[in-house]
Amino acid sequence: MALKVEKNKNEDPQNLVKRFSRRMRRSGILHQARQNQTFEREKSEQLKKRAALRRKELQEEYERKKKMGEL
């Protein structure tokens, strides 16, 4: 997606930069590029299951300690 901004007659360079910046923000190009920078691979099913089990164990341990008054 190309973004083109041409200088108008008698336009200051500052105004041109400001207009370009505004169009960049509105187009969402920069936002999309930043999202693509932080791409994470999808986790395997086994890793997902392990993580879920670990979360469940930690939650149960927390609840047990809370009941016993250790927190």
Image (cartoon, grey):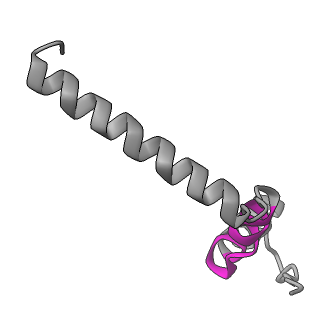
**Residue at image coords 61%, 58%:** 48
Residue that protrudes farthest toward the top in the picture: 70
**Residue at image coords 62%, 78%:** 26
Above or below, comparing residue 34 to residue 65 in the picture:
below
**Residue at image coords 74%, 65%:** 42
Give left or right: position of 7 versus 23: right
Above or below, comparing residue 58 to residue 9 in the picture:
above
Instruction: Say which quarter of the image contains residue 40.
Output: bottom right
Q: Which of 56/34 is in front?
A: 56
Give the main secondary structure, helix, strand or loop, of the magenta stretch.
Answer: helix
Quarter placement of the C terminus: top left
Instruction: Say which quarter of the image contains residue 36.
Output: bottom right
Above or below, comparing residue 47 to residue 3 in the picture:
above
Q: Position of residue 44 (x, y in %)?
A: 73, 63
Quarter placement of the N terminus: bottom right
Query: In this picture, which residue range is highlighted in magenta?
Result: 23-36
Q: Which of 2/17 is in front?
A: 2
**Residue at image coords 82%, 75%:** 10
